[in-house]
Amino acid sequence: MQRREFVESVAAGFASALAAVSWSQLTAASAFAAAVPETAPYEFLSPDQAKLLDVFTAHLVPTDDTPGAREAKVVRFIDHGLATLFKDYQKEFTESLTAFADFASHYRPDGATFLELSTREQIDVIHELERLKPEIFWDLRGVTMTGMFSHPEHGGNFGKVGWKLIGFQDQYSWAPPFGYYDRGRE
Amino acid sequence: MSGHPHHPSEPIRLLPPMRTYAPTDEVDFVVVGSGAAGGVMARELSRKGFSAVVLEQGPWLTERDFSHDEFWDLLHPEKRLTNDRKNQPGTSRKTDKDEARLSGWNNYGRVVGGGSVHFTANYWRFPELEFEQAKRFGVPDGSTIADWPIRYADLEPYYTKVEWDIGVSGLAGNPFEPPRSKPFPLPPLPIKSEGVLLERGAKKLGMHPWAAPMAILSRPYRGRSGCVACGICIGNACEVRAKSSSLVTMVPEAVATGRCEIRPLSYVRKVETNASGRVTGVTYFDKDKKEVLQLAKAVILSANGCETPKLLLMSATSAFPDGLANSSGQVGRNIMFNGSALRDGLFEHEINGWKGAVVSRVVWDTFELPSSLGLYGGGGFDFRCGYGPMAGDGTWPGEPTWGSAWKKRARDYFTKRLSVYGHMSSLPTPNNRMDLDPKLKDAWGLPAPRLTFTGHPNDFKLGEWFGKRGEELLGAAGALSIAGEYGGPDGGGPHLLGTCRMGNDPGTSVVNADHRTHDVPNLFIVDGSNFVTSGRGQPTMTIQALAFRAADRITALVKAKSI
């Protein structure tokens, strides 16, 4: 997979922005403080968009016996990313989010918005989105997961909760055994 | 003499002082490209006493400029390792009838050191049969496959030289490896869980797994550090100089001769010729996009299988109307990318492929396939999973993709999976080629490279067979579940091969066995474009062996006053 993946590594979701970023507009995001106060204004998202994303991403990676998207500060990552590194992706992202909101508003005959639905209904809507509008689902999922697993210096994966979830450690040097199967072979 | 051109205030001296030349100095050789081949040419020719200027499109970085950060390119675009499609777009189409569309088909290292800076570092020698397949197996319908003008025995000393001069880790004795004159200079890298599982599966199927030959140091060697197994190796440059790239092997040794200048951020746009049909130098864009003419007695193109033919086609004159060195019409043709067959396996216990180098064991029993299969070519296998944490969003067919149910499986998807990777040969065809897009230009106003490519039908069948065999390997290794079904010729990528093929017949090839172009006596081509056949995957080792041999051949020609 690796060679092909490498070739196509900029082909999907958030990553599609990588090839199209306007270099001159870059700001130094590397030191983006994870300590953004909850009440701080958003850089790109409207308050309504942020609220919608908060609930959506918390369904995708819920807080259960381990931390989820909220603890990883995924919405802050998305907001800051769209204002900086992924600026060229603003239009595409906004279209996806709007399409999702529109899709959700057709779930109930009364036209209730996603946030007005019950938790059970919200979950059902996301299942339907995945089934009927997969491109929108995977686009928004990709953005969410980027906020879960990218380096904490970019604003998501706060406290490395994403890395802990998948068992990745950012240690810079390893020695065998690397996994279960090579024990006793080192 | 002057210091390193791009770190004027470098507190740590990473390179010796470097000799520089004026563009009006007629140097012995200009080498276009500083990668796997260009690095070797620079080092060998300067060591043999020649003056050389190496022109590299990209920047000259050091390990202090490297990071495993997934957004490094965005934060530091001046430090990206590969070609940027925004500035240098490409187009591709399947056949001549189609309109070519924007495409990232040509992927190459665009830094001093080229693709060897970020590669996986699989260093497989070609088997002996690779060089005479047309003779042994015939030429399949719809293919232009031919025999090389050289044989394995001609290259063997140079394969060995590659291993010892750059540092390759491995173990002699693989029954499917051709004869070698010397053992590896370094023992194999440590076996990983993927390697143990490949051994398990292969042995059950009666195959012969073996330690992977890798251009990564298993121990300190020639002043460089051994691998620290930091992981996420593919696509990233090495911060400890353990990956044996041209950047840390050939380039500093070329500079140390005091006869070689590496000139980064120099994008060659034309090879200049005079009225008698000889090369006089090259014109390039410097870092400020100003045109500079560098004079040279001879020119060597080591720019890769896309950029080299592109440059020849851009160098057309009234004397060479179809492009320089293209009287055969073969420049840009016969393009091959190798093929891939992939399946994913999920296992019971942790593999943690993200630690360490990518590959630790290979299976080469399938280099040559039984004739009863009716397949042309062959390939080899490895098990691997070198993904970084950005692959933490993994899923598995039939299982939830989000919510608490997905979360409970996310760790398994990340730590307990691997891919079987079948690396395969690919056939050249008469119509598969790269040329210049008639409309699209890059940021320097030069034509974008256009690909016309449809894989040979044999290569799809080969992909199917390797995919099924890969599934058997996964099953025999104990995979709990197997998914994915990709197999066939790659339609692009970093393996850019065959576009200036080597041969004895000036009517069907671009260079002769000395890498000299048939048409221009002082113009040479040394890179993956010379390949007559694709190899069973993993071309870089052979690119470097060819380069070491080419340096000897070219030196002999100079001594014979033949250039």
Image: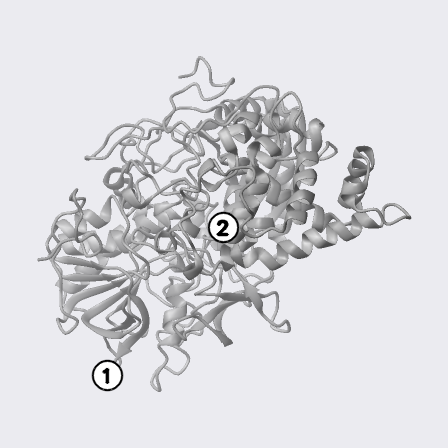
Q: What distance separates the C-alpha of mark 2 from that of mark 1?
A: 41 Å
Q: Nearer the viewer, residue B491 or B151?
A: B491
**Which residue lies under the disc numbered 2?**
B136
Q: Circle 1 sits in a helix, a strand or a loop, which is it?
A: loop
Q: Specify whether B42 is left or right of B289.
A: left
Q: Specify whether A174 is left or right of A48.
A: left
Given the current orientation, which residue lies at the most extreme front position?
A: A39
**Which residue lies under the disc numbered 1?**
B276
The C terminus of chain B sits in image quarter: bottom left
Expressed as whole percent of the image width and height from the top left, the position of residue B327 reads 39, 77
**Chain ID, mark 1:** B
Residue at left offset 35%, top offset 36%:
B179
**Chain ID, mark 2:** B
Q: Specify whether B386 is left or right of B514.
A: right
Judge whether B187 appears above or below A121 on screen: above
- What's under tag 2, amino acid-wise? Arg
Judge whether B191 appears above or below B287 on screen: above
- What's under tag 1, amino acid-wise? Ser
Q: Is residue B381 visible?
A: no
Expressed as whole percent of the image width and height from the top left, the position of residue B205 reads 59, 25
Judge whether B315 appears above or below B18 on screen: below
Q: Nearer the viewer, residue B318 or B227?
A: B227
Q: Circle 2 sits in a helix, a strand or a loop, which is it?
A: helix
Q: Nearer the viewer, residue A151 or B91?
A: A151
Residue at left offset 52%, top offset 34%:
A157
